[in-house]
Image (cartoon, helix red, strand yellow):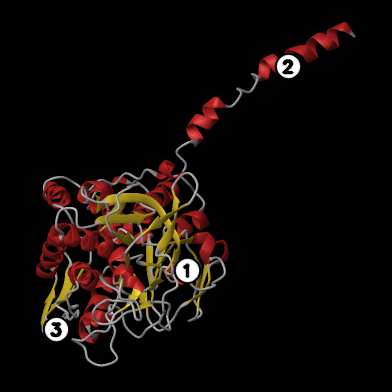
Amino acid sequence: MSTTERPRILIVGGGYVGLYAAMRILKKMRYGEATVTVVDPRSYMTYLPFLPEAAGGNVAPRNLVAPLRSALKKAEVLTGHVTEVDHARKVATIQPAAGESYELPFEYLVVATGSVSRTFPIPGLAEHGIGMKTVEEAISLRNHVMAQLDKAESTTDEDVRRKALTFVVIGGGFAGIETVAEIEDMARDAAKIYKTVSRSDMRFVVVEAANRILPEMGPDLGLWTKGRLEERDIEVYIETSMDSCVDQHVVLKNGMEFDASTIVWTAGVKPNPVVNRFGLPLGPRGHVDTAATLQVQGFDYVWAAGDNAQVPDLAAGEGAWCPPNAQHAVRQAAVLGDNVIAGMRGFPQAEYKHKNLGAVAGLGLHKGVAILFGKVKLKGRLAWWFHRGYHGAMVPTMNRKIRVFTDWTLAMFLKRETVGLSEMEKPFDAFQEASAPAPKPAAAAAEPKKELAASK
């Protein structure tokens, strides 16, 4: 921890907003003007749009994360949580990854804690659901799917096979549709190496409560995407939801019931609940209430942006709020960084205004859908190229850009890896088993009984 007496800019969160705002501030700040401190429970930023590709094996997991200490060499990076903020004293309480908590003074505060999965009290969901908000969840999903194919290949019990080969995704937004498309693509490729498991044995189901999927794309592209998924034998049920998944028995509101060993939950996000402890004004859904300048209402030294903030969408009109997506987060971070510098120097604050450039979605290898500038609609391979080009350009740091494009280039000449490392979920089991006392051999255990019988 720094002992400098320079004013501290404390950035809570190292995701999109935290990383990009810190980079912007460090770039524009004069030497010795302030200390930038970033606090996050993870030591890396995750590029979330690549999670489905990581689950499908198209991007190596380490290549979709940017180490904060490498990207922010001129900043302090603390691995831990900010548990409280005392605005009267301008002090934050830090709970580090190890050791006792301590107080950290600051002059300026940036709240960039992001979001977490929005869940509901559905019976069985907490026990059996798999989220898609972290790189760990994406890799766990990949390993889990491959383990189910292994299980199906190794059993003669039809009920076990059917359950192992049934995959359900709850949520028809970008995360859900891209995830089901990528894991179906991977499973289709993987089936070629199995003798008794084929794609026709598998069942993929998408459940969406709204009346269409990919609502950001508009009704026509959403309908087109639904048709393409159904052509791949992916069942898509709209205007329905999941009532229960106790013991991995899925019950849908439309009356359908079936067993599924894989239940992926992508039904929306909510602001990280830690913001409730920061003493800041919150909107009706728990977001930090900010002005168009990204300053928190009532605080001239606190800024917030990204998924945990309620930011007015000036481009959309009165009463509209910026949606929680990467496009807004990255651009808000730049304005926020400039405004922090302006705030330190006593200059006016700029308002955030950004017109949506469009949206892109990958639907597996060489398949995609896109809408650009609200007018240009792309489908198939061309949309997939736009998807890869945009996200490849947006992934942070040149190191990661090169690694991602290298992954994609190699994939053009090499087959997809179809190995699952399911034992990574329990990495210490093998050592613990080896360390356990060896059982006595059956023959040796029987010897004393024979001697006792002879003596009688």
Say what amino acid the circle numbered 2 marks. Ala
Q: CA distance from mark 2 to mark 1?
A: 65 Å
Say which amino acid is labelled 1. Answer: Arg
**Sequence-wise first label, 1 or 3:** 1
Q: CA distance from mark 1 to mark 3?
A: 39 Å
- Judged from the image, the secondary structure of the residue bearing numbered disc 3 is loop
Q: Is residue 110 left or right of residue 335?
A: right
Describe residue 59's horizontal placement relative to residue 107 as left or right: left
Could one spot residue 223 in this view of the protein?
yes
> Label 2 belongs to which residue?
446
Tag 2 secondary structure: helix
Q: Quadrant of the C terminus?
A: top right
Looking at the image, which is closer to me, 59 or 166?
A: 59
Q: Position of residue 358 (x, y in %)?
A: 16, 77
Secondary structure state at the residue bearing disc 1? helix
Decide: is 308 above or below 394.
Answer: below
What's the residue type where badge 3 is placed?
Gly
Q: Position of residue 221 (x, y in %)?
A: 20, 81
Closer-to-camera residue (42/126): 42
The residue carrying mark 3 is: 374
Q: Which residue is mark 1?
A: 277
Q: Mark 2, mark 1: which one is toward the viewer?
A: 1
